[in-house]
Amino acid sequence: MNKDIATPSRTREILQKHGFSFKKSLGQNFLTEPNILKKIVATAEIDEQTNVIEVGPGIGALTEHLARAAHQVLAFEIDDRLIPVLADTLSPYDNIKVVHKDILQVDLKKETEYFDQSGPIKVVANLPYYITTPIMMHILASDLIVDELVVMMQREVADRISAKPGTKAYGSLSIAVQYYMEATTAFIVPKTVFIPQPNVDSAILRLVRRKIPAVEVTNETEFFKLTKAAFILRRKTLWNNLLNSYGKDEATKLWLENSLQQAEIDPKRRGETLSLEEFARLSNALEANKQ
């Protein structure tokens, strides 16, 4: 068994060897606790049938644990300074492909042609804090069917994604993710196990793809537009937020009134009190009543 990358001493040794310095703009924080990495792999239930996509492998700490458990690993790294580092640290493994590209710019369906067998595809990653949401939405909205995501992010963002209606954390992000996936927080990762140490604790979020979306909507684009509109100003009523988004002319007001009535939703409620089912009912009513 190769010596783990993710110990404080080995991490420092690798950084010194390659003269690597952290870029704050890329949100680089390297995990230095192998037991947490083992726990991440166990949470994702990875076996030799699984193909894994990793985003931001850093110096390969999580990557090597994934390679030991999975069939193949496809890792996307944006920082060109880390490509030679990864070639060095991951040299013992022949089932890893490191792609030097921005995950937000890639066609995931095309890139995953690398996988030579058709097992489940899972995303397992320690996501850069500053760009967590765009990366997740890019993956969920891509043509590639990802069965599961087990991703590390700021604890606060994980709370927002897994939030339930009526809570402070619940918002359009909760709905956008929960529409496709069942979301649960698996465990908390303390800030003390990273180099450099971030300001906040992290959480491991587990997202399992639903067989069909959580609710049935006639127009997905309009459904997501509605959920965003409902949270523009959290302290405002649903009615005020809808007027601000859709317009205040008489025809629009009438359309909104009729749709809310049809969906049996009180316009004086706030967006955060509406469940996915209620948003779907309203979205479908808005579509049905369009002139």
Image (tube, rainbow, N blue to C red):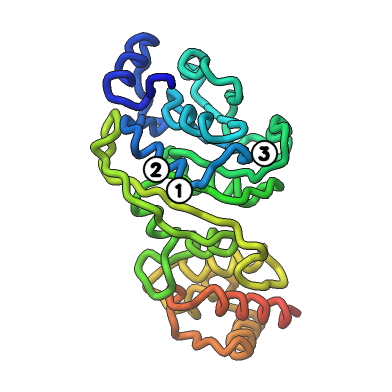
Q: Could one spot residue 134 in this view of the protein?
A: no
Q: Residue at x 61, y 31 (%)?
A: 72
Residue highlighted by disc 3: 108
- Closest to the observer, 165 or 6: 6
> In the picture shown, does residue 36 fall above or below 85?
below
> In the picture shown, does residue 239 fall above or below 10?
below
Question: Could you give the CA–CA distance between mark 2 and mark 1, rounded to whole angstroms?
Answer: 6 Å
Question: Could you give the CA–CA distance between mark 2 and mark 3, rounded to whole angstroms?
Answer: 26 Å
Q: Could one spot residue 285 in this view of the protein?
A: yes
Q: Is residue 155 left or right of residue 135?
A: left
Residue highlighted by disc 2: 39
Looking at this view, name the residue that lies furthest to the front.
1
Q: Are marks 2 and 1 in contact (CB under 8 Å)?
A: yes
**Dot 2, crowdedness within 10 Å: few (<14), some or many (≥20)?**
some
Q: Residue at x 35, y 16 (%)?
A: 15
Q: Secondary structure at mark 1?
A: helix
The three-letter code of the residue at mark 2 reads Lys
The three-letter code of the residue at mark 3 reads Leu
The three-letter code of the residue at mark 1 reads Thr
Q: Is residue 152 left or right of residue 262?
A: left
- Closest to the observer, 238 or 185: 185
Looking at this view, name the residue that lies furthest to the left.
192
Query: Mark 1 or 3, which is nearer the eye?
Result: 1
Q: Residue at x 31, y 45 (%)?
A: 189
Q: Secondary structure at mark 3?
A: helix
Residue highlighted by disc 1: 43
- Closest to the observer, 261 or 251: 261
> In the picture shown, does residue 112 fall above or below 163?
above
Question: Could you give the CA–CA distance between mark 1 and mark 3, rounded to whole angstroms?
Answer: 23 Å
Question: Upstream in the sequence, badge 1 or badge 3?
Answer: 1
